[in-house]
Image (spheres, grey):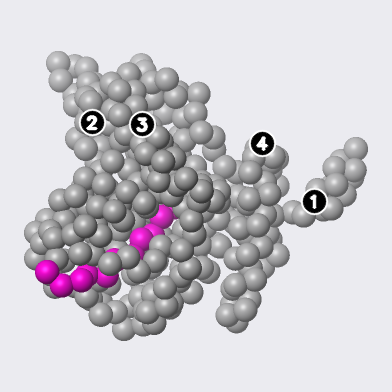
Amino acid sequence: MKTVIYYFSGTGNTEKVVRTACGALQAHGWQADACAIEKAENTAAAVASCGCIGIAYPVHAFNAPASVLRFCEELPAQKEPMPFYVFKTSGEPLALNNISSLKLRAVLEKKNYVFRGEYHYVMPYNIIFRHSDAMAYRMWETAKRLIPLDCADLAAGRVPPEKKFPFGGALAWVMRVEHWGGRWNGKKYSVEESCVHCMKCVNECPTRNIRYEDDAFRFGGDCLMCMRCAFRCPKNAIRIGLFNKWKVNGAYSFLPPAEEEEERHKRYCKAAYRRYFSAARERVLACGGDFPDELLMPSAEEETVSARAAE
C-alpha cells in the first residue's frame, strides 16, 4: 500500500508523530511518505498514485487549523472511493478534541474520500503554558508506544471505534472563530529590542505572514496562531498580541529530566491525563509492549502521601 501523510505542524510535535508513523507503516510493508502541507506540490498526481492518504494536524481550538481545512478543500475529487485517516495531536486528552476532525471529514467525504479512522496523541503545549520536562517526556514516550499499535491496526484495515461528542458539530462551528481571531490577533504581533534579526521567524512562517521591510518586522493578516515564530525565536523576542501571557518559548528536550522539578500546573486536567496514560499502559501491555511506571501520572493516594511527606 502506498500512502502519503499530509501534515501541518506548528512547532514540531505533529511532525514527530508523522515521521514515527511513517516508519511504523513501512514496517508493515507500506510505502509511506510524509509531506508538509505548506510544501505540497503536484498534489493531484501524488494522491492518484496512493491507495489511501493521511491528514495530520495539531488541534487548534478543538478544530483542525485553517490551513489544513484549506488544503482539504483544494484536494481533487475522486472518481473511485479513496480511503483517508487522521492523526492529530493536542496538549490535553479531553473528549472535546473528538470534534476537531468533523469539518475536515465533511469536506473530504463530499469528494468521495472515505474515512478510515483517526488517532490522537497528547503532546506538550506550545501556547497556554509550558509543560514540565517530565510531562513532555511522559507524553512522547507514550506516543512512541501507541503509534506502532495504531499503525498495525491501520495496516490491517481495522477501523477504531468512532468517538462522538454531544452537539459536536455545533461546538466545532462556534470554536472555528479561532480561525478569524487568529488572523486578527496575528496583526498585533510585535518584536522586542532583544531581536537579533536572525530572520528565523520570516523564513519559517508557514503562511509567509511575516515580512521584514524598511528596517521593521510586519505581521500580516494570515496568521494561523501556530506559534512557530514565538516558540522558536532564539531570543524570545516575539510578542503574540493579546495572548502574550500564554506564550511558550523554546523546544522541549523530550528526555528524562535530569533532576526532579515541581509540576506548576499539576491540577490542570489531571484526571484526564491520568486516564490517558493509564489506558495507554493497559493497551501497550496487552499487546506485549513495555510501559514503565514512570510514564504514569501519580494516583490520588500517591499524591496524598507525597504531600504529607513534604509537610
User: Is 17 included in the stretch rendered in magenta?
Assistant: no
Drawn side of residue 161 relative to residue 10, left or right: right
Of the numbered discs in the image, which one, if any, rests on residue 192?
none
Residue of label 2:
222
Return the residue nearer the eye: 12 or 272. 272
Looking at the picture, does residue 249 appear above or below residue 164?
above
Query: What residue appears at the point 32 percent right and 43 percent down from the top-left corner?
Result: 65
Drawn side of residue 122 relative to residue 64, left or right: right
Name the secondary structure under disc 3: helix
Query: What residue appears at the point 30 percent right and 29 percent down from the top-left corner?
Result: 180
Choose the circle earlier in sequence order: 1 or 3: 3
Residue of label 3:
177
Choose the circle earlier in sequence order: 1 or 2: 2
As measured in the structure, the alpha-carbon distance from the residue carrying label 1 to the one carrying label 3 is 37 Å
Residue of label 1:
300
Return the residue nearer the eye: 305 or 80. 80
Binning the other alpha carbons within 10 Å of mark 4 as few (below 14), some (14 to 19) or many (20 upward) gives few
Residue type pointed to by label 3: Val
